[in-house]
Amino acid sequence: MLENGFVYITQERLSEIENELQQLKGPGRREIAAKIAEARAHGDLSENAEYDAAKAAQSLLELKIAKMGGMLMRVRIVDSSKFAAGEVHILSIVRIKNVLTQKESKYTMVSPEEADFASGKLAITSPIGKGLLGKKVGDFIEVIAPAGKQSYEILEIS
C-alpha cells in the first residue's frame, strides 16, 4: 500500500487474489465448519482442545477473508506501458550490483502486497525499492537497509 491508501497490483495478481478469496469463502469455510461440527460431537466443549483449535482456525480464516476483502476495495491495476521508458517504476525488472560485494541481483518492482524477496519480487516501499524508483541505468543509489548502509549500481531496466 502506498501513502494514498491504494494497493497497486497487476491484473494477474488481482485474479490470483480473487480466486484465493473464493476458495477461502467456499471450501475453506465448509472445511472449518465440518471440523467444528466433528469436535462438537465429541462432547463437553469446556475441555475440548479439538473444538478450541477449530474455533481458532475459523477466527483466523475469517480475519484473512476480511483483510483480503478490504484490500480488494483499494486495488488499482497497474499497466506498466503507461510509465516512462528507461526509468525504474512499479513492474520494472531491475538488475543491480552491490558496489561493495560486486554481487548482482535481479528484482521485479512490486507493491508491498505482492512482495516476495525470495522469488525476486521487491516492494517499492522497501529501502532499496524506494531508492530505485525513478532512477536510470548507470545511476548509483545509497540506501539504509537493515544490513546497514549499502550502495548499488543500476545495470539494466526492462
Image (cartoon, rainbow, N blue to C red):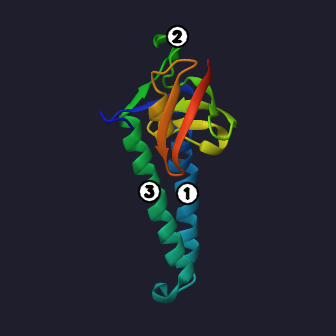
Q: Name the residue located 63 percent from the left edge and 40 percent from the top edge.
A: 100
Tell me which numbered mark, 1 or 3, is placed earlier along the sequence.
1
- Residue type, numbered disc 2: Ala
Q: CA distance from mark 3 to mark 2?
A: 42 Å
Give the residue at the far left of this rendering.
Answer: 4
Report the disc number at residue 30.
1
Q: Which residue lies most toward the front here?
A: 100
Q: How far, Cα to Cα, is label 1 from label 3?
A: 12 Å
Q: For the residues carrying marks 1 and 2, which lies nearer the camera in this image?
A: 2
Is 82 left, or right, of 118 in this rendering?
A: left
Q: Name the amino acid, label 1.
A: Arg
Give the residue number, with chain letter if any, for mark 2.
85
The answer to whether residue 15 is visible is no
Mark 3, Cα crowd under 10 Å, few <14 / some 14-19 / many 20+, is some
Mark seen at residue 62: 3
Q: Nearer the viewer, residue 131 or 106?
A: 131
